[in-house]
Amino acid sequence: MKVRLVDIAHARSGDKGDTANVGVIAYRPEWYGLIRDTLTKQRVADHFRGMIEGGVERFELPNLNALNFLLHGALDGGGTLSLKTDAQGKVYSTALLRMVIDVPEADAKRLQLPAAP
Amino acid sequence: MKQVVRVAAGQGFWGDDLDAPRRQVEGGPIDYLMLDYLAEVTMSILQKQKERDPSMGYARDFVGAMESVLPAVTGRGVKVIANAGGVNPPACAAAVKAVAEKHGAGGKLTIGVVTGDDLLDRLDDLIRAGHALSNMDTGEPLSTVRDRVLSANAYIGSVPIVDALAKGANVVITGRSTDTALTMAPLRHEFGWGATSWDQLAAGIVAGHIIECGAQCSGGNCLYDWRSIPDLANVGYPLVEAKPDGTFVVTKHPNTGGRVSVPTVTEQLVYEMGDPHSYITPDVIADFTTIRLAPDGENRVRVSAIKGKPPTDKLKVSIAYRSGFKAVGTLVYAWPDALEKAQLADRVLRERLDRLGLHFDHVLTEFVGAGATHGRLAGDQHEAPEVQLRFGVRGPDKAAVERFTREIAPLVLNGPPSVTGFAGGRPKVEEIVAYWPALVDKSVVQTKVEMVQ
């Protein structure tokens, strides 16, 4: 079943120099395992391919049902140098939430996941 | 010893809601009002102001904030801690003193002024002594941009603020203190936490991280269930109720809008986060993977179980330097084929800049309304009702950037059709002040506290 990340997680993003960080938080504790297993470093790097110049780092915060991603080279130089509308990476959060993931039907049912429209 | 200490946040950055400090002291009981004014590049703006007028160089908003909270400070014993001093904490203290005297309250303020973070006049000595102050991101030594440096300040921790409070200050004004130290220091002072009380110090830092952006932890900019967040027009700024063991509750005053919940606090915890295992500050390294959050009644979140460990022997230094000029111009193209028209305008503009022989380090085109922030992830936007062409240039040559700003308006009559949205006039040329993060040995930074009666 197709599931939209935006329906199972919320997020906030910010900047540090030319790096954007995106914290992704599962809406329900029982959904954390799914985003932890699905949102690998590679998957997120692929998602943002062509949009960021550097690599991706990934950290787990099981205590907050959250993951933190660092997207390097994401802000056109960052801060005052950047010519981008989103110079401070404020909406990389929802850009990540555009991801659509495939979940086996049985898991989706067990976890009561909302299906993508 | 107090068993509960309340620290309230009244400003999340320079430019935040001017009325929030007053609402925080009047809306309910608090012990400390914490005001954070400094972002990465704020110091350089203040340095430019100080160059023009040696009595400036601090966050002027703070003087008005102090005026609005004076009755609470002089009458009810609320203490104020702010990094409003910028690059000139003594001048900031003098301005606060003057405004207090105007209200006949000059004798009731004891201002602790924290200095020692400003390294600008010491940079050459430091470089000569072998401190490369290399850029933490690129590894380049500071000498490559030394002649363009505008400001250089070490991020300092809680010690001088605790010192000022111990000496009886009811207002503490710092320069480049870390945002989090402004909250941790009063807790450390009240509860007598030692320099190696790692878990408590880390808890104070986490409390600071949660409230340092003001209402961003109490319903502002919150994605979780955002439609249901009540009365943002009267959003309640956050406060922490802390206990000696380092546990605390995040809440806000009654009869205010916004919301404090596990999701609103969690969103703020992950904001601007790096490695959550090592949130490095001058006093302690906090481990964000140990934080426990639990609901504790309406608009209350209990925070506990935080672990800390010893800090490094370095301080981060925030250096700002001149780095050329930039300008951004915009035009709006309307349906039909809004995106295609904007794309043609982009090509025309680029060709004209080429024909004029103008060269830039960087040119960036965005199509706002057609994926400017989400790129290709936003999908097909060919039916967009309108698209804003947003065209930016950056380079060392001010004249070239100036010339560019005159090339936008002509497109209205001599470019693609269905164009509007040019009423703002020519784009403004901005000098770029860039940020250079570096590390320096702790031993070279000596902070000082001066008491102003």
Image (spheres, coloured by chain):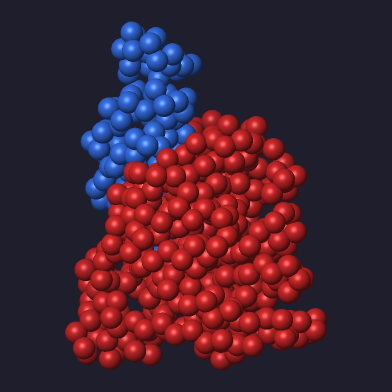
Chain colours: A blue, B red
In the rendered view, does B337 fall on the left or right side of B79?
Answer: left
- Residue at the image point whose x is 52% and y is 53% from the top: B243
> Farthest left residue?
B130
- In the rendered view of the protein, which quadrant contains the N terminus of chain A? top left
> Farthest front residue?
B1
Residue A87 appears in which quarter of the rendering? bottom left
Judge whether residue A85 can be spotted in this image: no
Give the camera-side residue of B370 and B136: B136
Give the camera-side residue of A106 and B248: B248
- Residue at the image point whose x is 64% and y is 73% from the top: B62
Horizontal and vertical percent position of residue B93: 61, 83
- Residue at the image point whose x is 64% and y is 88% from the top: B453
- Residue at the image point whose x is 26% and y is 45% from the top: A57
Horizontal and vertical percent position of residue B60: 64, 76
Give the camera-side residue of B210 and B111: B111
In the rendered view, does A16 fall on the left or right side of B140?
Answer: right
**Count of numbered marks:** 0
In the rendered view, does B264 fall on the left or right side of B105?
Answer: left
Judge whether residue B132 can be spotted in this image: yes
In the rendered image, the vertical position of residue B254 relative to residue A62, given as above or below: below
In the rendered image, the vertical position of residue B28 relative to residue B70, given as above or below: above
Horizontal and vertical percent position of residue B343: 46, 45
